[in-house]
Amino acid sequence: MSQSVRTRPEGSGRALSEAYDTALLDLDGVVYAGGDAIAHAVESLAAARAGGMHLAYVTNNALRTPDAVAAHLTELGIPTGADDVITSAQAVARLISEQVPAGARVLVIGGEGLRVALRERGLEPVESADDDPAAVVQGYGGPELPWGRFAEACYAVARGVPWFASNTDLTIPGPRGIGPGNGAAVEVVRIATGAEPQVAGKPLPPMHRETILRTGAERPLVVGDRLDTDIEGAFNGDVDSLLVLTGVTDGAQLLAAPPQHRPTYVDADLRGLLTGQPDVVADGDGFRCGGWTATAGAERLELDGDGGALDGLRALCAAAWTAAGAGVCELDTGKALARLGW
């Protein structure tokens, strides 16, 4: 594992659940969507666990407590304990605890997950900028979070109180579509105050540190659906990653990914944990995976052959990422992706 520039997805002769000791799984878009389990998730995770892989659930969503997340997963048929859940609330609470006195008051702009995490670190959650807080922490508070909560944050931050954010994801998936995430709420306070928060969540190091401390993983595999949080977080933590295509990332975004957003492996869903990964090999001026060969032409990516769509996508990744490394970044990908159904 290294942070050298990746120019193609890697292959694996072993099932990923055998090659890695711990799966660090994102939740939204990976395990569930809109509260319901994603197809193949429950049985795939059960098989990985039965084979000896430790499963840990790592989420930037600071709203729910680990107990609540574990209960939800268990209801979906994925037996989970609270100790198997790591949240950005826990990561930001540790970050705050290292910078304020023990027992300090912290103004909370968010949900119960933040309050529980702060108490775990011996800090006292408070609700008003007039409660003499030593820090302000902002996390996703759900769609009903009152506008006045942002004003409380602004009052305190404008007075010079240190400001922390659990994460800065601009969006969050929900049953009706994509809604504004904590990052959008953070922008409200940033615009009003001109200040910058310290951020704990993926893709930044405090979240990776929290995950490793709590899981004890030695050979972790990050599993996610977002390039800018899950995959970049793995890159920053210098660990391998599996991108699953059940969430927000589409084929065009994957082909255009900068080096820090390129996953080690790509698969359709969590069944990818249970299999090896095919090699992508150089073939003349192009790259071959399965029955497909992809090349970077003068203006567009070209794809020849046939076979499984994922193999074609992996070959296209190699052609696109290699071309980007040579300074060719404006290739038309539409026709090639259309051949694969994307």
Image (spheres, rainbow, N blue to C red):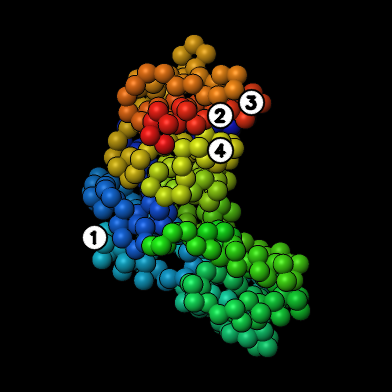
Please state the horizontal and vertical placement of residue 207, each as a whole percent of the image: 53, 57
Residue at (55%, 69%) from the top-left corner? 139
Give neighbour class at mark 2: few <14, some 14-19, many 20+ (Cα, 10 Å).
Answer: some
Question: Can you identify the residue that label 3 sits on?
Answer: 328
Q: Relative to 151, is 91 above or below? A: above
Give the mark toward the camera: 2 or 1: 2
Amino acid of disc 3: Val
Give neighbour class at mark 4: few <14, some 14-19, many 20+ (Cα, 10 Å).
Answer: some
Q: Is residue 279 left or right of residue 114?
A: left
Give neighbour class at mark 3: few <14, some 14-19, many 20+ (Cα, 10 Å).
Answer: some
Please state the horizontal and vertical placement of residue 278, each as a whole percent of the image: 36, 27
Question: Can you identify the residue that label 2 sits on?
Answer: 332
N-terminal of the pair, mark 1 or mark 3, is 1
Q: Which of 51 and 31 is in front in this view?
A: 31
Please state the horizontal and vertical placement of residue 313, each as a whole percent of the image: 42, 30
Q: Residue 14 carries which label?
A: none
Q: Which mark is residue 77?
A: 1
Question: Disc 4 versus disc 2: distance between alpha carbons?
Answer: 14 Å
Question: Disc 3 versus disc 2: distance between alpha carbons?
Answer: 11 Å
Question: Can you identify the residue that label 4 sits on?
Answer: 257
